Amino acid sequence: MTVIYPDVAFALNALLDGLVLRCTMVLMGHPARWRRIIPAAVIGGLYGALAILPPLWLLASFPGKILAACAMVALVYGRGPLYLRCCLLFFLVSGSLSGAVTAVTALFRTAGHPLVIFLTSGLLCAFTLTVVFRASARAAVEGKVVRAAVSWGGRTVHLRLLRDTGNTLLDPATGKVICVVEEKALEPLLNGREILYRKIPFQSLGQKRGELRCFTCDGLTVERADFGPYPIGLADRPLTDGGGYVGLWGGEKGGNCAELAAKST
């Protein structure tokens, strides 16, 4: 009989929950928000420690586990339009991690059934990821998703952007193609700080007229290429239906009007 102490259960669950939450945010394209991940992981650790106590056996039930996972995701990601998709990805990452643990246990204990469980869970997770997140996966494989870093006011946030050649929205002040990023993804950079925005009119599919809030960051780096101060547009809604990136990058070597005109001729 294996004896699990509450302090061990707390530490193990907190560590694993933190790892799964970070992987979920990265796969969704959002930066790892440690200020939210750490409290959520602590809550997950407390839940794991309380769930092993006999008087609180309901916490260890399937509905209890689902509610605890959804609460942790809500604390880190918030109740946005992609909340349910984020929850699904959290369950998939958790299932993959559990399958890996089961596989290691099977190898060391030479038991047959845990390996079957691992293979089944792994195939299920791979199938769901392929179906649900196929768009972002395809973009990553084709090299359309790039890594970027936006700096402003002494802070830096790391993001994933979609290389979108159709994004030709220019900043009148600098003549550069605006890098459009979900406002939610820039919360660690801008939250609680005063910033001077300018509004730029634009048109897009499904919206004939609109205004995009824009500011100039202190520095933008895309795939190790430094673009210096650069105009960043804030999108008030998700730019993708499945994650993998949180912004649109249409600039090349500064992305000014002259270069775009030369490429189009």
Image: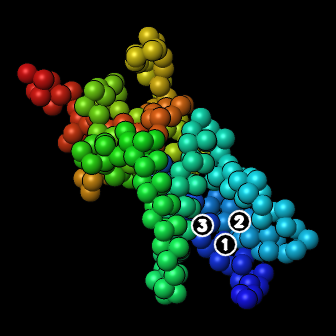
Task: Report which quarter residue 247 is drawn in.
Answer: top left
The answer to whether the residue labelled 3 contacts the one labelled 2, judged by CB atoms less than 8 Å apart, is yes
**Tag shown at residue 13:** 1
Find residue 214 and report its horizontal and vertical position in percent.
46, 32
Find residue 257 and report its horizontal and vertical position in percent.
21, 27
List the residue tagged with mark 3. 18
* Direction front: furthest residue: 112
Mark 2: amino acid: Gly
- 142 lies left or right of 172: left
Q: Nearer the viewer, residue 81 or 5?
A: 5
Q: Nearer the viewer, residue 34 or 134?
A: 134
Q: Nearer the viewer, residue 99 or 236?
A: 99
Secondary structure type for disc 3: helix
Residue at 72% across, 76% down: 10
Find residue 223 and report its horizontal and vertical position in percent.
27, 53
Mark 3: amino acid: Gly
**Tag shown at residue 44:** 2
Mark 1: amino acid: Asn
